[in-house]
Image (cartoon, coloured by chain):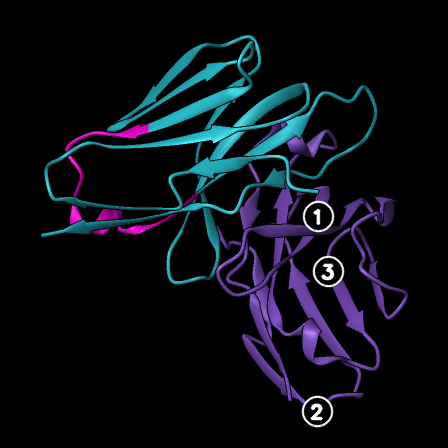
């Protein structure tokens, strides 16, 4: 079943603007990860935030996590045309055992116009 | 070093035929995952390997789907008697630790399967 739900489904902005994507989830998590996918093929890991963290930065990326609201946001600052891609949040559930898979949302399709 | 590789990159098959999809994980990665992505959709988890064993097969959609991993390395996903609804991109990922979901997963480029 779907764990993460991204919002919006699609986002179109001009180069230089900031892009914000949101993710909501349903169950307790160990961590939440954001991935980028170009052209419907392999995914690239962007950033991981653990359940005891509230904010994390990586270059032009900023991720926040609010476990009380079961939500996360990904902010891309000063966007570039090369940021055009689909962005997925993925949650790792808070199991004590060997559960290994991530649960992905359906993604936000970001289009950055030059 | 080399990333996750998958073969073939594209596969067109007739309904009812069997197909085998291959995944070569990053050397030394103990955890391996198979996902499926239908057009415009998110990723659907299929199966997870820790070493050669599969602790979680919960995502396999039917008994026509099976997977194995040998030598703690290469994995093969087999779909028997393919159906049109099996058409999708099949993605493989690997990660370094057994508690793989807590860590970054490295994805291969995927195999695009089309069942005609």
Magenta span covers which residues? A75-87
Residue in view at x 56 percent, y 56 percent: B4
Location of residue A85 with respect to A25 vertically, above or below: below
- Residue A11 screen position, x and y as percent: 28, 45
Q: For the residues marked 1 and 3, what is the alpha-carbon distance in whole angstroms? A: 9 Å
Task: Say whether mark 1 and mark 2 are on the same chain.
Answer: yes
- Residue A62 screen position, x and y as percent: 32, 23
The magenta stretch spans residue A30: no
Chain drawn purple, letter?
Answer: B
Task: State the quadrant of the C terminus of chain B.
Answer: bottom right
Q: Colour of chain A?
A: cyan
Q: Mark number for residue B14?
A: 2
**Label 2: few (<14), some (14–19) or many (≥20) C-alpha neighbours in 10 Å:** some
Chain of the residue that carries numbered disc 3 in the rendered image: B
Q: For the residues marked 3 and 2, what is the alpha-carbon distance in whole angstroms? A: 26 Å
Discs 1/3, front: 1
Q: For the residues marked 2 and 1, what is the alpha-carbon distance in whole angstroms? A: 28 Å
Q: Of label 2 and label 1, which has the lower sequence position? A: 2
Corner quadrant of residue B21: bottom right
The magenta stretch spans residue A84: yes
A87 horizontally vs B90: left or right: left
Question: Pointer 1: what residue?
Answer: B32
Location of residue A67 with respect to B9 vertically, above or below: above
Task: Say whether mark 2 and mark 3 are on the same chain.
Answer: yes
Question: Pointer 3: what residue?
Answer: B74
């Amino acid at each position: 079943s779907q764990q993460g739900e991204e919002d919006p489904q699609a986002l179109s902005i001009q180069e230089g603007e900031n892009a914000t994507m949101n993710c909501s989830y349903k169950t307790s998590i160990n961590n939440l990860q954001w991935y980028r996918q170009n052209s419907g093929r392999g995914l690239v890991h962007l950033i991981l935030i653990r359940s005891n963290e509230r904010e994390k930065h990586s270059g032009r990326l900023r991720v926040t996590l609010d476990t009380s609201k079961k939500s996360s946001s990904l902010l891309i600052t000063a966007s570039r045309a090369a940021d055009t891609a689909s962005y997925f949040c993925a949650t790792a559930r808070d199991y004590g055992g060997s559960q290994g898979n991530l649960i992905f949302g359906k993604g936000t399709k970001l289009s950055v116009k030059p | 070093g080399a990333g996750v590789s998958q073969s073939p990159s594209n596969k067109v098959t007739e309904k009812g035929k069997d197909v085998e999809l291959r995944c070569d994980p990053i050397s030394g990665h103990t955890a391996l995952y198979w996902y499926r992505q239908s057009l415009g959709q998110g990723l659907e988890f299929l199966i997870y390997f820790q070493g050669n064993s599969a602790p979680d097969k919960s995502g396999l959609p039917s008994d026509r789907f099976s997977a194995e991993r040998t030598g703690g390395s290469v994995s093969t996903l087999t779909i028997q008697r393919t159906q049109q609804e099996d058409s999708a991109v099949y993605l493989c990922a690997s990660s370094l630790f057994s508690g793989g979901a807590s860590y970054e997963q490295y994805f291969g480029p995927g195999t695009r399967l089309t069942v005609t």
